[in-house]
Amino acid sequence: GESLRRLAAARGILLGSAADDTGLRNEPGYRHDLGSQFAALTPENAMKWDAVEPKRGKLQWGGADRAVDFAQQHGLKVRGHTLVWYSQLPGWLSSGGFDAPTLRRLMTAHIAKEMGRYKGRIRTWDVVNEAMADQSGLRKGLWLDTLGPSYIAEAFAAARKADPGARLAINEIGADGVNAKSDTYLKVVQELKRRGLVDEVGFQAHFNLKGVPPSMAANLKRFADLGVDIAITEADVSVKDPGTPAQLTAQAKVYADIVRVCRSVPRCKAITVWGFTDRHSWIPDSSPGFGSATLLDDQLRPKPAFTAFQDALKAP
Ligand code: G3I
């Protein structure tokens, strides 16, 4: 049949998936589907700070290299994920008690090292991830508490310097619709854009059967109006196991709605699903009993969501 990547490409959409390192290492079927159905991948964990520098100064690039090499061999683009985040930090960093000048140096050096290693091989970097608070303002945590709000622009400036050819993105969770969080996000993006530091804005789109927020298209449009590209970066739709036929049909509709929202916003040029098979999905780890969140089942067989995704891409 027609691959999702071709159908998406015909709509000007770069279709990607999160890539799981176990799947990449050990599973031919997983590698086959990732390499043939998708035009891009995002290493799900392998580029996070705790993965690449578990001990200070001891850099470990095994998983990240594997993902980038796989992508190159199969003609996929790479979304680098992620340089500055409050989570999945190595213990030496999060509990190191560093003062502001030291932490700032560690942050910019990390960006330079990781982006430098893959210079020219990563299409887009998620430079700063999940920096907004749910209610208002920026999320508290190591970066904000030690460096103050300027850490975001400082990270982007360091990223521009490290790989001037890479597209720089900011990425956010729970800011898909118009809400308090996306209001803050809009202000942050506006300022970054004014300074020429951001190219693309990511909306993660972690959903469930409640569906896509009704205001999502309007929300994406108000960001696009700032002159940035829009990407859906981590789409999935959690469903209670094993998923009744009615639930899987409802899930399929949510996936189709995600495609439709992106297609309704001219600057929405990329969709990444956060895993493409129930075999490798973060959802059941964090929400036990909800292991059916992706397009293919755990045997890599298409679910109703896969067909609905195809149809939403094909629709005129
Ligand atoms: O690092 C240990 C490893 O040493 C050990 O062998 C393994 C055994 O279970 O656990 C490993 O850590 C796990 C890690 O994934 C790598 O597999 C963590 O316990 C687990 O919590 C972690 O979960 C990841 C999660 O981010 C952490 O916040 C998920 O796989 C990943 O899908 C998820 O992705 C995030 C995005 O990066 C940002 N947006 C939200 C999204 C979903 O939470």
Image (cartoon, rainbow, N blue to C red):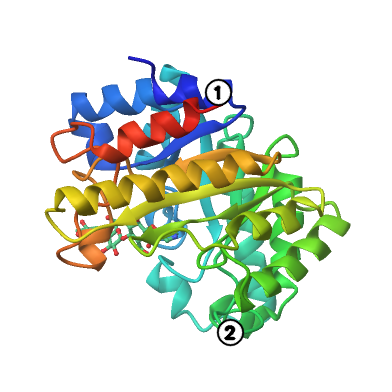
Q: Which residue is mark 1?
A: 9
Residue 286: which disc? none
**Which residue is located at x 37 percent, y 25 percent?**
37
The N terminus sits in image quarter: top left
Q: Secondary structure at mark 2?
A: loop
164 horizontally vs 256: left or right: right
Q: Is mark 2 within 8 Å of ligand 1?
A: no
Q: Percent from the top left, x then y, of residue 288?
A: 17, 66
User: How many marks can you see?
Assistant: 2
Residue 13, compared with residue 193, is above or below; it is above
Check disc 2 and give the amino acid type: Gln
Residue 292, compared with residue 138, is above or below; it is above
As drawn, which residue projects farthest toward the top?
1
Mark 1 residue crowding within 10 angstroms, few (<14) / some (14–19) / many (20+):
some
104 horizontally vs 294: left or right: right
Check disc 1 and give the amino acid type: Ala
Q: Percent from the top left, x then y, of residue 204?
A: 50, 56
The C terminus sits in image quarter: top right
**Which residue is located at x 42 percent, y 28 percent?**
38
Q: Which residue is mark 2?
A: 135
250 horizontally vs 11: left or right: left
